[in-house]
Image (spheres, helix red, strand yellow):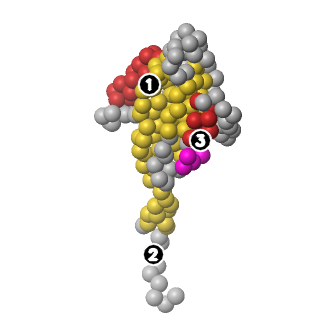
């Protein structure tokens, strides 16, 4: 055109900002089946609004928690972040795995909605989410989950007759927002 400027060249690039929110940190104990206390534990999972994906980590016993703590210390030495969270690093794909403890275990886990989780605890028929992770005889477990649900609970249950197990559960939610930047 008549009024166009010859060196005008604008490229608009789409970039993504990812924010994270730690929304679950809890500890407890799954008792043995003969203890008289519940061998099943339900942990409500309340995802923050606009969660695009999330990462959970379940650690059973002291060693699992210690291993994750050690990873946190090691990350602090190599990064500029004061309190690096291994779950955040894993969720951002800056590290490819979290510590795995290969130890015998009697604890299983699955995800369900709260109604089915409660039914499971009361030994009534229940269904679990088949499209979400679950595990048997875990010392620890973790995963990136792309499924968000408003009604969600984590169920831990111990098959041991004799040994109760301490647990720690942590979860971090991630929200990804596109942003457009002009490159001159």
First in sequence, mark 1 or 3: give its number: 1
| Disc 3 target residue | 115
- Queried whether the magenta region covers residue 81, the answer comes back as no
Q: What residue does disc 1 label?
A: 28
Q: Position of residue 3 (x, y in %)?
A: 45, 88
Task: Give the crowd class for mark 3: few <14, some 14-19, many >=20 residues within 10 Å.
Answer: few
Q: How many residues crowd mark 1 within 10 Å: few (<14), some (14–19), many (20+)? A: few
Q: Decide: marks 1, 2 in contact (CB < 8 A)? A: no
| Res. 67 visible in picture | no
Q: Which secondary structure, mark 3?
A: helix
How far separated are the C-alphas under marks 1 and 2? 62 Å
Q: Is residue 144 above or below residue 176?
A: above
Whichever of labels 1 and 2 marks the residue nearer the N terminus, that label is 2
- Which comes before the other along the chain, label 2 or label 3? 2
SS class of the residue under badge 2?
loop
Please tell me whether the stretch drawn in magenta is mainly helix, strand or loop: loop
Point 64% across, 28% down: residue: 123
Q: Is residue 23 above or below residue 141?
A: below
Which residue corresponds to mark 2? 8
Please, is residue 158 above or below residue 23 in the view?
above
Numbered disc in front, either 1 or 2: 1
């Amino acid at each position: 055109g008549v009024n166009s400027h010859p060196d005008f060249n604008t490229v608009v690039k789409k970039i993504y900002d990812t924010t994270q929110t730690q929304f679950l940190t809890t500890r407890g104990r799954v008792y043995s089946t003969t203890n008289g206390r519940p061998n099943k534990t339900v942990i409500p999972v309340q995802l923050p609004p606009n969660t695009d994906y999330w990462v959970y980590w379940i650690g059973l016993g002291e060693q699992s928690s210690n291993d994750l703590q050690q990873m946190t210390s090691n990350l602090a030495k190599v990064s500029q972040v004061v309190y690096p969270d291994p779950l955040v690093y894993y969720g951002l794909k800056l590290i490819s795995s979290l510590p795995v403890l290969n130890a015998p275990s009697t604890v299983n886990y699955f995800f369900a909605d709260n109604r089915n989780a409660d039914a499971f605890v009361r030994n009534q028929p229940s269904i679990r989410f088949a499209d979400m992770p679950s595990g048997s005889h875990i010392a620890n477990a973790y995963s990136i989950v792309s499924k968000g649900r408003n009604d969600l609970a984590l169920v831990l249950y111990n098959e041991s007759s004799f040994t109760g197990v301490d647990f720690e559960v942590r979860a971090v939610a991630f929200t990804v927002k596109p942003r457009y930047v002009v490159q001159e």
